[in-house]
Image: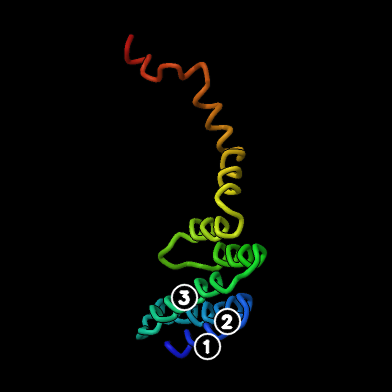
């Protein structure tokens, strides 16, 4: 496992690390099948750690926002570990574009607009009104 991490650290670009991590994910998926079948499976956790480390190294090696975006998309689409992939991808995008971008995206989203309209609605002036009568 340590040799694999060293090999990933020596790779030149984040794309190389992402491609190598995709291979690790395929191996990990094969290990999941072994676990489902009931075979002895001690390697699954180590491949899961390798996959997470591979994504972290790819993010560290990324130099442009486009490379970071590719890392974020890959994490969203492929990662199935203990961490939430959507939250992790948001953190990568904040690193790529900055906190101002993230906040403007959040406050300009349709979900936020619907929330504001919901809280400003006339019908909800007093939500406990039905209990007061």
- Residue at left offset 45%, top offset 59%: 84
Report which residue position mark 1 lands on: 7
Which of 42 and 63 lies nearest the eye of the viewer? 63
Image coordinates of residue 6 in percent, x first then y, are: 48, 87
**SS class of the residue under badge 2?**
helix
- Residue at left offset 38%, top offset 78%: 45
Residue extending furthest left?
132
Which of the two labelled residues, at mark 2 and mark 1, occupies the earlier sequence position?
1
User: Quadrant where the N terminus lies?
Assistant: bottom left
In the rendered structure, the answer to whether residue 81 lies left or right of residue 96 reads: left
Viewer-side label of 2, 1: 1
Alpha carbon separation for disc pair 3 and 1? 12 Å
Image coordinates of residue 33 in percent, x first then y, are: 46, 79
User: Is the residue 63 above or below the residue 85 in the image?
Assistant: below
Report which residue position mark 3 lands on: 53
Residue extending furthest bottom?
3
Q: Which mark is residue 85?
A: none
Report which residue position mark 2 lands on: 20
Alpha carbon separation for disc pair 2 and 1? 10 Å
Which of the two labelled residues, at mark 3 and mark 1, occupies the earlier sequence position?
1
Image coordinates of residue 78 in percent, x first then y, are: 55, 68
- Residue at left offset 48%, top offset 67%: 80
Callouts 2 and 1 close, C-beta under 8 Å: yes
User: Quadrant where the C terminus lies?
Assistant: top left
Q: How is the image coloured?
A: rainbow
- Label 2 Cα neighbours within 10 Å, binned few <14 / some 14-19 / many ≥20: some
- Label 1 Cα neighbours within 10 Å, binned few <14 / some 14-19 / many ≥20: few
Alpha carbon separation for disc pair 3 and 2? 11 Å
């Amino acid at each position: 496992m340590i040799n694999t991490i060293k090999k990933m650290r020596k790779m030149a670009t984040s794309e190389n690390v992402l491609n190598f991590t995709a291979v690790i994910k395929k191996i990990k998926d094969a290990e999941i099948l072994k676990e489902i079948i009931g075979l002895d499976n001690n390697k699954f956790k180590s491949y899961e750690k390798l996959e997470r480390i591979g994504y972290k190294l790819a993010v560290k090696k990324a130099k442009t926002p486009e490379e970071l975006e590719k890392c974020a998309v890959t994490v969203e689409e492929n990662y199935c570990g203990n961490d939430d992939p959507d939250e992790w991808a948001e953190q990568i995008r904040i690193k790529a574009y900055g906190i101002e971008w993230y906040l403007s995206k959040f406050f300009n989203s349709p979900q936020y607009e619907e929330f504001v309209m919901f809280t400003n609605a006339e019908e909800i002036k007093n939500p406990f009104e039905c209990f007061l009568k």
